[in-house]
Amino acid sequence: MNDQLLVATRKGLFILHHHRDGRWQTAETHFLGEPVSMALVDPRDDTLYAALNLGHFGVKLWRRRAGAAEWEPCAVPVYPPQPDPLPEPLPDHPPAAPWSLQQIWALEPGGSDQPGVLWAGTIPGGLFRSDDGGDSWTLNRPLWDRPERTEWFGGGYDAPGIHSICVDPRDSRHLTLAVSCGGVWQSHDDGASWDCTSAGMEADYMPPERREDPNIQDPHRMVQCAGTPETLWVQHHNGIFRSSDGGAQWQRLFAQPSSFGFAVAVHPLEPDTAWFVPAVKDVCRVPVDARFVVTRTQDGGASFEPLDDGLPSPPAYDLVYRHGLAVDATGLRLAMGSTTGGLWLTEDGGEHWQCLSAHLPPIYCVRFG
């Protein structure tokens, strides 16, 4: 069971430790006052990474090796020179985003057989690989040069972004990505070639003739069941989707009080169990009827139950971002952080929640380590 919780916020990185008496307490605070967009503990060597988005001062990446007291700067992904001029945008599409790093939106380790390999998903939609623990980065050109990428567009941000990277635990060469807005993409050869695998997803925001276009889907977050990697779950802009065949086909599911949201977590051993945080869709983006709940399915999406024991009583307007919900290796302990600075934890799969803090800065990401 993981006894460390990373909480990346608009005003710093907070690390909580679990004590033997059951208490969780903030043990470390780093980068106070600075926006931390992503954090990671590499399970292969316990190195800690933190990605910062400093706006005018750019994107930064820091690393703290296991046992070390100090952080050290890493390289950040750098895009190659941008062609001049860029191709004209397609009809009804915004101009192409500049070839310049705006944010590290996903950071994942490679497989256990790939020491030093890291994958970074970025805005404006580039996938980068490091083979040396963040000392250097290379843009994955086979994905970046796909002609379909010219149709990608921004969802939560002006430019498209890769926010979810799943490395198959059985085969490190098998990668599955989710792009907002650009659908789901897979490689079976370590990124040398890619296929768009969004069949079955539906984009209600598009004209009828393009509603099922796989390349313009808006997955908000995608997760893979570690014990049954063929099962993937997606919280999409237009609902909840599940695949039981490795993403070849997706099934749309409907939940109450809403199928809209940003976060999803899947049980690491039980592929039919997943958690979501519902909200009112589009411009509103607050809990339905101001009732803040987590919904859980234990039957593959055939039914959903709302869980709110220990969560704020109505009216509550907490929103949980894409990376604001995490589950540990047991499938029983989950952590959740909201845009209003609330942090909750459950030790029994969501049946009961305890508030660890109600006064943190807006939370971007929670991860066990």
Image (cartoon, helix red, strand yellow):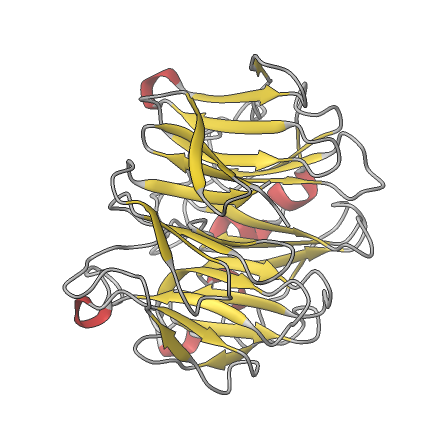
Residue in view at x 45 percent, y 49 percent: 323
Residue in view at x 65 percent, y 72 percent: 270
Give the residue at the far right of this rendering.
113
Q: Position of residue 291 (x, y in %)?
A: 22, 68
Give the residue at the far front of this rendering.
21
Residue in view at x 29 percent, y 40 percent: 362
Give the residue at the far bottom of this rendering.
302
| Quarter of the image where the C terminus is located | top right
Q: Is residue 17 visible?
A: yes
Q: Position of residue 180 (x, y in %)?
A: 45, 53
Among the 4 quarters of the image, the one containing residue 267: bottom right
Relative horizontal placement of residue 244, taking residue 295 as reference (left or right): right
Above or below residue 21? Residue 286 is: below
Relative horizontal placement of residue 94, taking residue 195 as reference (left or right): left
Q: In terms of depth relative to the viewer, which is nearer, 13 or 78?
A: 13
Q: Position of residue 149 (x, y in %)?
A: 54, 49
Above or below residue 211? Residue 335 is: above
Q: Is residue 100 visible?
A: no
Q: In terms of depth relative to the viewer, which is nearer, 113 or 163?
A: 113
Give the residue at the far left of this rendering.
315
Above or below residue 255? Residue 93 is: above
Q: Position of residue 217 (x, y in %)?
A: 47, 64
